Amino acid sequence: IRADHSLATAFQNDFLIGAAVNSRTIISQSSLLQQHYNSITAENEMKFESLHPGEQRYSFEQADRIAQFARENGMKLRGHALVWHNQTPQWVFEDGNGGPAGRELLLSRMKSHIDTVVNRYKDTIYCWDVVNEAVTDEGTEQLRPSKWLQGIGEDYIELAFRSAHEADPNALLFYNDYNECNPLKREKIHSLVKALLEKGAPVHGIGLQAHWSLLNPSLDHIREAIERYASLGVKLQITEMDVSMFEFADRRTDLTEPTAEMLRLQEERYEQFFRLFLEYRDVLASVTFWGAADDYTWLDYFPVRGRKNWPLLFDTEQRPKGAVSAIISL
Ligand code: XIL
């Protein structure tokens, strides 16, 4: 692609192209981010355990640096994530006497965390993942049996949204989840958000994480999910996209490079995804990738450490893969 071609400007700036960043990649990937992305999300730095390691102790340094990077480069910033079952410190759920925190204590901690964090970044963050992954993949149960659910009860989700809205009435508030295109999970997410809206909770959008692969989900399932969620009248964003090369090459743990076939398939998938997204531009106008280039991706460590993956749009040298020009010329 030509040096002056950029994903960020390909859609006249009214369709955001984002990347998850961390304190290291805002340095190691800074020029790539500046050229091709107009939105960022902190990969870990704004999670509960990073920001609020002790009851009376907040640590904003790394998150502040990411917010500053966004401001300096005129990028949008998505906040991720206020209430989640992972990466939340133990103290939150304990009463200090060796027992679990009761409903009132846990609620007041949740609210004061949300209030402090949302207020701190209200000038920079335009939208927040307020509740992340509250729906369970298992069976017919709707909600994940997290410590938030166990300690507060089902209304923790609604109350989290209300607190975030109080702290920043201008922020767009999202419910964010994965396996979002799986029909069973999709229906659980749909009915959760529907019930929240019926209660008048300030939910403005659904985030589709989009941790996808060369094989799954199918384009039909993606379209069905987009239409189903959009029928609720909320905005949609793709919030954590990557297209894993594994699952397709399950037994190829020996690979040190992606094969030509894997790269071709991945390019085709990315092109199909963006063609589909652009059909729904009126409701879906932001795609954030969970990383900027294959030199760093969380999938190198997840679900197992030490198996290289190449899920993003730029390669390990931060050069554009074929998918970049395919998307730009759509
Ligand atoms: C991941 C980060 O990328 C990793 O660095 C960290 O070790 C675990 O969390 N869904 C989410 C993200 O909402 O916050 C997760 O990020 C990936 C899955």
Image (cartoon, rainbow, N blue to C red):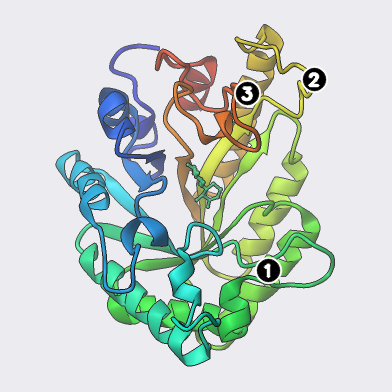
Alpha-carbon span between mark 1 and mark 2: 31 Å
**Which mark is drawn over residue 251?**
2
Residue type marked 1: Arg
Look at the picture and state if 301 lies above or below 70.
Answer: above
Give the residue drawn at x 21%, y 45%.
65
In x, y percent, where is residue 71? 18, 46
Whether disc 2's CB lies below 8 Å from ligand 1 is answered no
Q: Which mark is residue 144?
A: 1
- Gap between marks 1 and 3 measured at Cα: 29 Å
Work out which residue is located at the far front of the displayed protein and give it: 97
Question: Is the residue 320 above or below the residue 175 in the image?
Answer: above
Q: Could you classify mark 2 by the number of other residues whose Cα lies within 10 Å: few (under 14), some (14-19), or many (20 or more)?
A: few
Give the residue drawn at x 52%, y 67%. Answer: 234
* Residue 218 on image: x %, y %: 76, 39
User: In the image, which disc is placed on residue 307?
Assistant: 3
Asked whether the beta carbons under mark 1 and mark 2 sit within 8 Å of each other, the answer is no
Of the residues shown, which amino acid type is indicated by label 3? Answer: Arg
Q: Is residue 194 visible?
A: yes
Residue sitting at x 54%, y 40%: 241
